[in-house]
Image (spheres, rainbow, N blue to C red):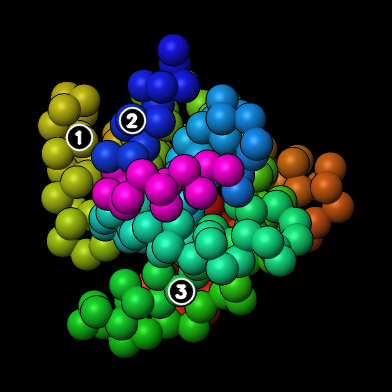
């Protein structure tokens, strides 16, 4: 069954005991198939959150977040009220702070911990990114991901892979970014939320739009 394969793969990712992993799935949903789908969706969104904040190891941080939540499920599950995904995003914020503290650059001014509003914003971002073609989605994540030399090298490699000059790559990325910005604006307007910007991991607090 698909859920069996998915469960095996998930357990290998978080490297926890089976008992703790089973508790995590039970907390997400009583139906194991649905629980597996929710797990995968939460992990995908965590990766996108870390990518959008400029982290160079988004998958590692996503799995670290899941590890920490799984380790606390037994003590929080009974009294927790609301969407479990929001708890993951709150823990992800702490993981992000730890990630920044280990970096040599000064700590930036960070946004507030995820709330119901930020969850809706991430939902809009998810929808807009998913609407992109696979090629455009990969291009935009690579082009705006990373920091410093890592970002520069990634862009050079991307241009070489596509067989185009750096300026042509910038134009292509800019067009995709503008499409995302428009999509985000429309989505947030439908939800009656202001703006369509978020902050870069190393910004000094100024808004940078979709980047």
Query: Residue 125 is drawn in which quadrant?
Result: top right
Are there few (<14), some (14-19), or many (20+) residues within 10 Å of tag 2?
few
Residue 143: say if magenta: no
Q: Which residue, as the protein is rendered here, is positioned at the far bottom?
A: 106
Q: Position of residue 16 (x, y in %)?
A: 31, 52
Residue 193 in view (yes/no): yes
Residue on which disc 3 sits: 94
Q: Report the quarter where the N terminus lies.
A: top left
| Alpha-carbon span between mark 1 and mark 3 | 35 Å
Residue 145 in view (yes/no): no
Are there few (<14), some (14-19), or many (20+) residues within 10 Å of tag 3?
few
Q: Position of residue 24 (x, y in %)?
A: 51, 49
Residue at the spot x=14%, y=50% of the render? Answer: 153
Residue at disc 3, secondary structure? helix
Q: Nearer the viewer, mark 1 or mark 3?
A: 3
Range of the magenta residues? 13-26
Residue 21: say if magenta: yes
Residue at the spot x=71%, y=66% of the render? Answer: 79
| Alpha-carbon span between mark 1 and mark 2 | 37 Å
Residue on which disc 1 sits: 159
Residue at the spot x=76%, y=48% of the render? Answer: 188
Mark found first going from the N terminus, 2 or 3: 2
- Do the residues under discs 1 and 3 have CB atoms within 8 angstroms? no
Which numbered marker is on residue 8? 2
Mark found first going from the N terminus, 1 or 2: 2
In this view, the residue in front, 67 or 53, is 67
Mark found first going from the N terminus, 1 or 3: 3
């Amino acid at each position: 069954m698909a859920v069996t394969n998915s469960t095996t793969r998930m357990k290998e990712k978080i490297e926890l005991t089976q008992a703790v992993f089973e508790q995590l799935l039970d907390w997400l949903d009583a139906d194991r198939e649905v629980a597996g789908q929710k797990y995968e969706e939460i992990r995908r969104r965590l990766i996108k959150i870390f990518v959008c904040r400029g982290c160079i190891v988004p998958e590692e941080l996503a799995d670290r977040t899941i590890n920490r939540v799984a380790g606390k499920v037994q003590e929080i599950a009974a009294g927790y009220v609301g969407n479990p995904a929001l708890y993951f995003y709150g823990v992800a914020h702490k993981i992000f702070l730890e990630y920044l503290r280990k970096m040599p650059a000064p700590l930036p001014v960070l946004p507030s911990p995820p709330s119901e509003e930020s969850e809706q914003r991430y939902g809009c971002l998810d929808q807009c990114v998913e609407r992109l073609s696979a090629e455009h989605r990969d291009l935009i994540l690579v082009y705006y991901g990373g920091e410093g030399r890592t970002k520069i090298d990634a862009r050079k490699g991307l241009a070489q892979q596509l067989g185009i000059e750096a300026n042509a790559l910038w134009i292509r990325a800019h067009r995709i970014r503008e499409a995302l910005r428009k999509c985000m604006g429309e989505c947030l307007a439908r939800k009656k939320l202001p703006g369509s910007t978020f902050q870069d991991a190393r910004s000094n607090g100024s808004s940078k739009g979709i980047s």
